[in-house]
Amino acid sequence: RNDSDVFLLSRRVGYFFYWHWSGTERFEMAGRLLPLELIDKCIGSKIWIIMKGDKELVGTLIGFDDYVNMVLEDVQEYEITPEGTKVTSLEQILLNGKNVCMMIPGGSPEDAESSSDE
């Protein structure tokens, strides 16, 4: 996978589609991945998890199960409060997948902020 690859979710068929940016202003479909297969490809990598509510987590994905309960290491927990963002460092956590809203492989809130400033 390189920087021009994009993962998109198709709810209609329940598959992740793996697209490759061809450089000619169009996407070419390179293959299909089931959601758990995509998460499996992220094991050992940094992942940004946006939870329901006001929490986000960034850490290294160690493992997961069919319910997307996850074990993460070297975790930064971002809690958005009216006073600002509170950051907590955690060595290792077991995250209940029930409250996961979105997962971004390789990303972090700082990456999103810096790209929106450009």
Image (cartoon, rainbow, N blue to C red):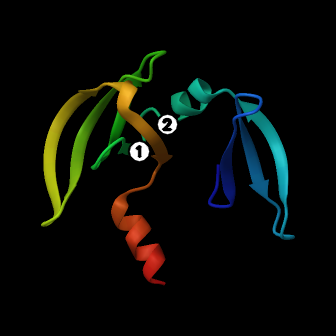
Name the image quarter holding residue 11.
top right
Badge 1 marks a residue whose secondary structure is: strand
Q: Position of residue 63 (x, y in %)?
A: 39, 24
Residue at 46% x, 76% y is 116
Name the image quarter holding residue 24.
bottom right
Choose between 3 and 66: the one closer to the eye: 66
User: Dot 1 corresponds to which residue?
Assistant: 47
Q: Which of the marked residues, 1 or 2, is nearer the chain's N terminus? A: 2
In the displayed structure, 27 sits above or below 67; it is below
Under mark 1, the amino acid is Ile
Under mark 2, the amino acid is Cys
Q: Position of residue 71 (x, y in %)?
A: 31, 26
User: Dot 2 corresponds to which residue?
Assistant: 42
In the displayed structure, 106 sits above or below 115; it is above
Choose between 72 and 87: the one closer to the eye: 87
Left or right side of 95 for 39: right
Left or right side of 51 for 20: right
Q: Position of residue 26 (x, y in %)?
A: 85, 63
In the displayed structure, 105 sits above or below 71; it is below
